[in-house]
Amino acid sequence: MAEKHQKKKKGSALKILLAVLVLLALTVGAAGVFAYNEINGNGGRPGAEVTVSIPQGSGVAAIAKELKEAGVIRSAYLFRWYVGHKGAAGKLQYGDFTLQTGGYSYDGLIAELSTYAKADSVRLTFPEGTTAVSYTHLTLPTILL
């Protein structure tokens, strides 16, 4: 009788272990599918256009946070990992970028963020013999008039 009870315990422990392993495999598989779809831009159709402002000197973590808050990506952690894996951190630029929510592959997003964002600029020419210090009291609208 004791043998029967011991076999029953082994059988139920094996079933529990098998159930845990199946759940773990399903979880890892679901995470892998999510990561694959996110990285390749299969997360959905492109949505609304949003403007994302990347401040000068921002690191990959700050850029990923801005993109996630704007709805361009779903996982800031995955984006940071992918940029590091590709070695593209030094290519990312600062500025204002017009992007769409969803539908971007990470490679496409890195390409977009690697282009220099055009900033408003004003060209100034100082007459020969003068220095920029001579004009420090002027404001930009005064110069343009």
Image (spheres, grey):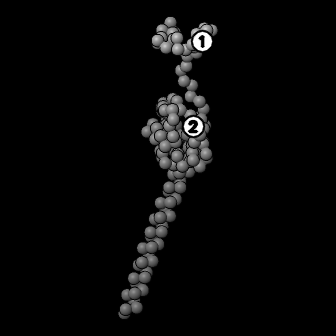
Report which quarter residue 7 is drawn in: bottom left
**Which kind of residue does numbered mark 1 sit on?**
Thr
Q: Disc 2 marks which residue?
A: 92
When the figure is inspected, residue 8 is found, relative to residue 118, above or below; the finding is below
Q: What kind of element bears circle 1?
A: loop
Residue 72 visible somewhere in the drawing: no
User: Where does the image place residue 112, in percent across and percent down from the top left?
Assistant: 58, 35
Numbered disc in front, either 2 or 1: 1
Q: Give 57 or 37, whichever is nearer the viewer.
A: 57
Q: In the picture provided, is 102 more to the left or to the right than 87?
A: left
Report which quarter residue 114 is drawn in: top right
Q: Give 61 or 29, whichever is nearer the viewer.
A: 61
User: Where does the image place residue 31, in percent across and percent down from the top left?
Assistant: 50, 55
**Which kind of residue does numbered mark 2 sit on?**
Leu
How far is the residue under mark 2 from the one under mark 1?
31 Å
Q: Using the image, tell me which numbered label, if any, was put on residue 125.
A: 1
Quadrant housing the N terminus: bottom left
Q: What kind of element bears circle 2?
A: loop
Which residue is at the far bottom?
1
Report which quarter residue 106 is drawn in: top right
User: Where does the image place residue 58, in percent across and percent down from the top left?
Assistant: 50, 37
Mark 2 and mark 1 residues within 8 Å of each other at the beta carbon: no
Q: Residue at x 55, y 16 (%)?
A: 122
- N-terminal-most mark, 2 or 1: 2
Q: Residue at x 55, y 19 (%)?
A: 121
When the figure is inspected, residue 45 is found, relative to residue 35, above or below; the finding is above
When the figure is inspected, residue 128 is found, relative to residue 11, above or below; the finding is above
Q: Residue at x 51, y 51 (%)?
A: 34
Q: Residues within 10 Å of mark 2 (few under 14, many from 20)?
A: many
Q: Residue at x 59, y 49 (%)?
A: 85
Q: Give 91 or 71, whichever is nearer the viewer.
A: 91
